[in-house]
Amino acid sequence: MTTGIWVLGDQLWTGQAALSSCEKEKKQTPVILVESRCYAQQRSYHRQKLVLVWSAMRHFASELRSAGWLVTYSIADDFQTALLNWIEKNGIREVRVMTGNDRPLMQLIQNWQLGCSVRFIPNNHFLWSAAEFRDWAQGRKRLLLEDFYREGRKRFKVLMNGNQPIGGQWNFDKQNRRPPQVKLETPQPLWFEPDEMTQSVIDAIKDENLTNYGEIEPFRWGVTRSDAKAVLEHFLRICLPTFGPYQDAMVTGEETLWHSLISPYLNLGLLNPMEVIEAAQKAYFENELELNSVEGFIRQVLGWREYMHGIYHYLDKDYRENNWFNHSEPLPDFYWHSDQTNMNCLHQVLIQVEKTGYAHHIQRLMVLSNFALIVGVDPQEIESWFHAAFVDAHDWVMVSNVIGMGQFADGGILASKPYASSANYINKMSDYCKNCAYNRRQRIGEKACPFNFFYWDFLARHQEKLKSLGRMNLALGNLLRISAEELEKIQALAVDWRQNHLLSNIN
Ligand code: SF4
């Protein structure tokens, strides 16, 4: 019986489970990778996301060929036609696929008739399988990230001294929230020049005009495992020693600061999570690095990333439809066109996303997501935008992250309170407010910062629901201190803004 392997675009690792299952017979095992034009057109994508995924797939196909696999690389209108042709041509009786991370694609595959059996091999690209996460989650009142992270530290023996965390604490976040009050000497990120194969993908995407969001050049992401390993190595050597203190800071013109930039590679399978964690832990011991930096980074991979993936598969498939606040405003047009807003924080972050397909976690959470939340944007619409805009976006990571953490649309399954804030937080953690058309101190008046009037408007609109959360009591107490007259003015500004920016979508 001929067995063939279909490698999905985010499974670009020779150790992935489907390839491993046929490693001994690789010279007789047909393998296929498919670039589906229709799939890519089902939603908007950043131009650089398409270049990244397709170029990485083409490079991986070439790597597999060199290793002796019988590889077909298909550029097709749709997955199914390409697969049917390949199955027929190679007389395939069983197609093996490593279980995909994203539910929509898995549902599609399960509904196809390919004329042969399809066998899903359990995904080995995460440290926690779906079943292991379920065992951890079942019976718990709250699925707290911190609890999950501690369990992961113990289970995988990471930064542990017996049963106790090294340094006597699990979390050193208090040392990792330094505002950028001084001029920061930031490291240069490691970028790459496109090779011939990447350039041909760039040219194809330009010619075919497949998507219209984001700048396609300069394209500087790595596209192979060896590029990804070089980025990891660069991070460990240059950035990790001082990663911690300024990991929440936002600085104009500084796109990457000390951030690792490895999420696109982890999410495509070019790096695997345990090698990243072990490398960081080794660097800690060998180079005597600061624990707050190393622990903060390891928590992103061992804690946050695994947790988001686990939650996505643990919760019901309708989780993505949650809308606890019943928000229904359209997404402001300037999310797609950074030049259409004069709010400097949003303008700066959106320019960066257009240029690179990247922003760090605080820019995403406390600028982009926060604003959509306090304005009252439909959570599914902002989730869709996040999925489109970032090169590291995949369904599994964006649904839980945006619906749960960013928009609190699940009513508190993931987070214990909404990440809503006024200009105060942005001013503390960035230099954006210094050059803004709005006044960060004002919540009413001509120059009032929209983050301010929307923040108070959000609290006023949802105070009954927010009271039930406990952790919002301080903020709600402050709301009560605002006079009825001022609150009326705040709410009038919010209504006006929506009318001017959402109904007509002209800023
Ligand atoms: Fe953003 Fe308001 Fe600060 Fe301007 S003043 S940068 S809109 S938070």
Image (cartoon, grey):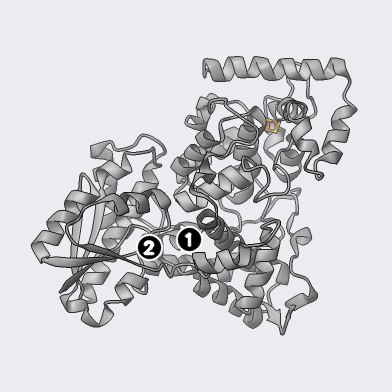
- Closer to viewer: mark 1 or mark 2: 2
Query: At which x and y percent is residue 132?
Result: 54, 69
Q: Residue at x 86, y 17 (%)?
A: 484
At x 24% / y 76%, what residue is drawn? 67
Where does label 1 land, which residue?
190
Q: Position of residue 341 (x, y in %)?
A: 57, 26
Dot 1: few (<14), some (14–19), or many (≥20) neighbours within 10 Å? some
Q: Position of residue 501 (x, y in %)?
A: 57, 19
> Can you tell me whether the CB of the residue at mark 2 lies under 8 Å from the nearest atom of ligand 1?
no
Q: Quadrant of residue 155?
A: bottom right
Q: Is residue 366 in view?
A: yes
225, 472: nearer the viewer: 472
- The residue indicated by pointer 2 is 99
Judge the density around disc 2: few (<14), some (14-19), many (≥20) Cα neighbours within 10 Å.
Answer: some
Asked if the beta carbon under badge 1 is closer than 8 A to the nearest atom of ligand 1, the reply is no
Seen in the image, is 411 located left or right of residue 231?
Answer: right
Residue 315 left/right relative to 225: right
Q: Could you say whether the residue bearing mark 1 is in a helix, strand or loop?
A: loop
Q: Compare marks 1 and 2 and give the one earlier in the sequence.
A: 2
> Is residue 436 placed above or below 91 in the rendered structure?
above
Ligand 1 found in image quarter: top right
Residue 236: where, in percent of width, then height?
57, 70
The residue depicted at 28 percent of the width and 36 percent of the height is: 209
User: In the rendered image of this protein, does residue 247 appear above or below residue 294?
Assistant: above
Q: Nearer the viewer, residue 301 or 117?
A: 117
Measure how far apart labels 1 and 2 are at the Cα level. 32 Å
In the rendered image of this protein, does residue 112 appear above or below residue 477? below
